[in-house]
Image: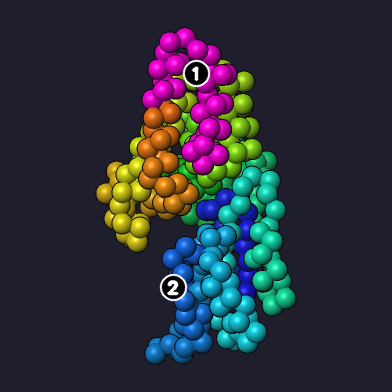
Amino acid sequence: MVLLWGEDGFLLREAALGILEGIAPREVDASEWRGGETADLSTPSLFGERRALLVTDARSLPEHAMSELASYLEAPAPDAPLVLCARVAERAKAPAALTKLVQPAGEVREVKLARRDLPGWLVDRARKGGLALAPEGAVALVETLGEDTAALDQALRQLASAFPGERIGRKLVAEQFSGLGEQRAWDLCDKAFAKDLPGAVRALASMLEAREEGLLILGAIASRLRDLLKVKALPDRMPLTELAKAAGLRFDWQARRYREQARRFSLDELIRLHGLVTEADRTLKSGAGDEVVMPALVVAIASGGEG
């Protein structure tokens, strides 16, 4: 059994799939744990395939699930991997309850990638995918799109499709992604709607220091909020591809992330936040300062709709 924890959901998933080494696991969202999931690990497959269980958003495991896992770990099935993925807020520590559960019988591993290591990670990932990405191109990707590894991975796919067989440097990155500097605003939205208050406040402060316009930041927040309202209104167990299509999202990873964020709020909270965004828009357009209006809104979002 392995507990993977860290700030980046994409990296957590990649690390989990690396541990499973090609085994097709049963995947369960922690909030949807029904009971009996560990029994599958002990049940022989009809075709002899290895069993595995991957639990995402493990911090949401209910009490009865924690009890079932504790009982299972007293006599775990041999050669049947069990991987828990726990996403935490920026600079947070490993979830204490999960660590206590796993440590006696398994491994607790932090999954992280420092910003300075992102260009090298991109070059290596591009090479494995058959794309020639120059170091300067990797740096340009991070500068343009930010530190979101899922978005960066998708960018590599776009570059491979747009420039097959070419070496990708700064110029081609700018050509492909000009106008996408708003990724910093997407990063702010990710932190705010994940209820990572310290991370959201730091992201906003960085944008205001760079003289990003409050109305542009507000537009990104309003767009994300509309997407979350669409996702919230759809069936919670809808497959990701169908969810992305129904909500008007471009990628499955967006659907996965937005579903995770929407689950952190009730529908009433999202509607209330929509009202706060509308009020902030009126206030900014009446001449109020970005440095006053935007922090109050971001704190309200990251505090769970309060404020």
The vertical placement of 104 against 221, above or below, is below
Residue plotted at (62% across, 20% down):
209
- Report if residue 184 is visible in the image: no
Amino acid type, residue under disc 2 in the picture: Arg
Residue plotted at (47% across, 80% down):
36
Residue 284, magenta (yes or no): yes
**Magenta part mainly helix, strand or loop?**
helix
Q: Say which of 11 and 231 sits in front.
A: 231
> In the current view of this chain or complex, which residue is farthest to the left?
246
Element marked by disc 1: loop
Q: Say which of 169 and 302 sits in front.
A: 302
> In the drawing, does residue 218 fall left or right of residue 116?
left
Residue range in magenta is 278-307
> In the current view of this chain or complex, which residue is farthest to the right?
104
Q: Where is residue 277 drawn, in percent x and y?
A: 42, 28
Q: Residues within 10 Å of mark 2 (few under 14, many from 20)?
A: few
Q: Where is residue 124 drawn, in percent x and y?
A: 58, 51
Element marked by disc 2: loop
> In the drawing, does residue 18 fall left or right of residue 257?
right
The vertical placement of 26 against 187, above or below, is below
Q: Quote the CA–CA distance across marks 2 and 1.
A: 46 Å
Residue 297, magenta (yes or no): yes
Q: Which mark is residue 34?
A: 2
Amino acid type, residue under disc 1 in the picture: Glu
Q: Where is residue 135 drawn, in percent x and y?
A: 60, 40
Disc nearest the viewer among 2 and 1: 2
Q: Say which of 129 and 274 sits in front.
A: 274
The vertical placement of 26 against 189, above or below, is below
Q: Give the labeled residue for mark 1.
A: 213
